[in-house]
Image (cartoon, grey):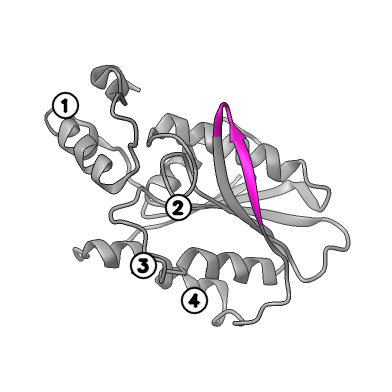
Amino acid sequence: MKILVLISPKRRMTTRESRSEKKESFLPLCGETPNPNPRRGQVQIELKSGKIRLVGELFTPPSLAGIHPALIICHGVPQAPPDPADRGYPLMAERFAGDGFVTLLFNFRGTGESQGNFHLLGWAEDLRAALDYLCSLAEVDPNRVSTLGFSGGAAVSIYVAAQDERIRSLVACASPANFDTLFRPESAQSFVEQARRLGIIREASFPQDLEAWLEE
């Protein structure tokens, strides 16, 4: 398996910068600015991760003749409410589709229109569900599936790739080595409260056991 790790600069960024500049800085690696009127398919899809419904978009190349390499884009842990004007992820998906990749962009549980609550191990289950879906498509070459992850999404893709041979290569951008700063006992409750404000933890009873949730 091929792994590329991109480390973000140590300059402290604002919340909005950390969400948008990180993605925009990656776009030059994908080529020039994407065509504003791409001739390729883009369809809304739904996945099932256990009992949780996940929502995403599938971007396909201009020609679906034959089979194609595939890419799953894994977003990071939200640090601010969604910004409709932020098209960083869709622009990347369009670019990769234009270059011949069947590209899946989806929301992990607790984010976007997907159901559920933020849970890192749950995110790993979600990525496996995305792999199941992508590898089931007739136009996808199951031997050429990659992931492109940012921050928490990068960490999850590394975790899953270590266990699932279907991921043949991955790019990890600004992946944390651990989540101690978020999940140490003295700061966990404040993180949960912040996650509720952001809407990534949606149920009042979640997590039922904070200590057990931290140990996961």
Residue at image mark 3 = 20
Q: Are marks 1 and 4 in contact (CB under 8 Å)?
A: no
The magenta stretch is 44-52
| Disc on res. 185 | 1
Mark 3 or 1 closer to N-term?
3
The picture places residue 24, in percent across and down from the top left corner, at 42, 72
Disc 1 secondary structure class: helix
Q: Which residue is mark 2?
A: 75
Mark 3 vs mark 4: give the one in front. 3
Foreground of the two, 145 or 97: 97
Name the quadrant of the N terminus: top right
- Amino acid type, callout 4: Pro
Residue 142 is at least partly visible in this image? yes
Element under label 3? helix
Q: Secondary structure at mark 2?
A: loop
Between the C-alphas of marks 3 and 4, the distance is 14 Å
